[in-house]
Image (tube, grey):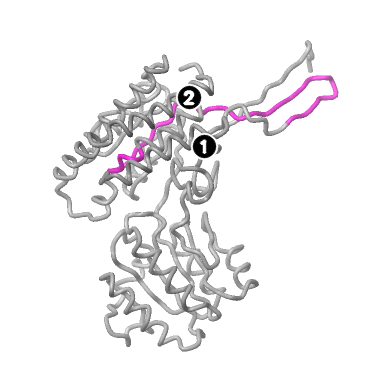
Amino acid sequence: MNTLLSLETRNAVLLKMAALLEQERAEIIKINKADLEAYDGNDISMHDRLKVDDSKVDEMIASVTHLASQEDPVGVERFQFKHDNGMQVYNKTASFGTVLIIYESRPDVTVEAAGIAFKSGNKILLKGGKESLNSNLKIVELWHQALKANQASSDWVEYLQFNRTETQAFLEKPTQKVDLIVPRGGEKLIAFVKQHASCPVIISGRGNNFVYVHKDANWDIALKLILNGKTAKISACNAIDKVIIDKNLPKKDEFIKTLISKLKEFDVQILGDEALLKQDGVEPIPADSTWYEEFLDYKIAIGEIDSNADAIAMINKYSGGHSSVIVTTDNKEAKTFMENVDTAAVYHNASSRFTDGSQLGLGGELAISTDKLHQRGPIGLQHLVTNKWYVHGTGQIR
């Protein structure tokens, strides 16, 4: 086990990493271009996640710089108690130890997730997808330079070049101690990790997020939020896949017509339930299972719903437990929706695209958890810790 580095050393490594990312910017983009050219898949969301351009490098630099400015998440007192016998009891945050991050195609995770895990005092094992191998290796090389420049062991950040079989073997019988695994990627990856892991796993689950257009919705807000949620970034887990419209919405058909024409401007494929099929450009929803699907594509399913209670029930049945939105001018109805919808983030008149660590004030995230245990929603720096009891005595026995 690596001895916890001082806060000053951890921050210095992060700032050095920021400087190296700036210095090697052109090289990172060049190496990433080779990864992009070698990617022969036709998954547009995968291609989008794989790409590193200037703005992506800017985000990486901003992420580690911000982390260096944040308070130490380790050793924070959560509780204290003075025992009748004079013992002084404290509960404080503590590092997990070693965190394994398994992810697909996103070189920025090699910076952001590793940075969060490192700042919270953990050793990081990175297992990226084969499609981003060269980009990832270059970034890990910079981590090692940043660590060595601050007399810290390069062991703090390690890249695992494993194929699927080797990954499975490592999950089942790790060749080194692993305290926590965070898989970031599609449902297949998550299911694979859950099936084989021999230590706790934080599930960074699927999206399949819903917008409920309540009967008292403001049209402009509803249209804006749906378009932003669906078209701004189709590869994001906080994108919108489903829209349910209250059948009592005034001038409902006119609203639906407007929504369809705006979605068509972005070439979005529109699936609709029976009530929607009378509109032009709408295809039937192929099966009930479509309501469970996360599309990660220019594709949306739209249906009608009878009431707020039915919207809540539908979202709780079909959504991925990630984010949900109600559009309404009725605050009481919004409160009912927000309290009863079982997703990690609930929105009233705002876009689901804000379910993101940096947007919600955490300065970045390791993942977005759809689990309820440990931490739900974006996992920031202050959540990547466990806790420990510190008990000070003078010889007390029980």
Tally the marks.
2
Q: Earlier in the sequence, mark 2 or mark 1?
A: 2
Marking on residue 10 = 2
Residue 209 vs 175, above or below: the answer is below
Q: Is residue 95 magenta?
A: yes
- Which of the 4 quarters of the picture holds residue 165? top left
Q: Position of residue 182 (x, y in %)?
A: 41, 38
Q: Position of residue 85 (x, y in %)?
A: 84, 20
Q: Where does the C terminus fall, quadrant-wise?
A: top right
Q: Can you name the residue that lies furthest to the right here?
A: 84
Residue 386 visible here: yes
Q: Which residues are magenta?
A: 80-109
In the rendered view, does 47 fall on the left or right side of 368? left
Q: Can you name the residue that lies furthest to the top here?
A: 395
- Say which of marks 2 and 1 sits in front: 2
Of helix, strand and loop, which one carries label 2? Answer: helix
> Which amino acid does the dot numbered 1 rest on?
Leu
Residue at 38%, 43% (x, y): give it: 59
Residue 216 vs 199, above or below: the answer is below
Residue at 52%, 77% (x, y): give it: 214
Q: Is residue 92 magenta?
A: yes
Q: Position of residue 124 (x, y in %)?
A: 40, 28
Q: Position of residue 61 (x, y in %)?
A: 38, 37
CA gap between label 2 and label 1 equals 13 Å
Marking on residue 191 = none
> Which amino acid does the dot numbered 2 rest on?
Arg
- Which of the 4 quarters of the picture holds residue 198? top left
Of helix, strand and loop, which one carries label 1? Answer: helix
Residue 1 visible here: no
Q: Assess disc 1: are there few (<14), some (14-19) or many (≥20) residues with their C-alpha within 10 Å of its C-alpha.
A: many
Q: Assess disc 2: are there few (<14), some (14-19) or many (≥20) residues with their C-alpha within 10 Å of its C-alpha.
A: many
Q: For mark 1, what is the residue?
A: 381
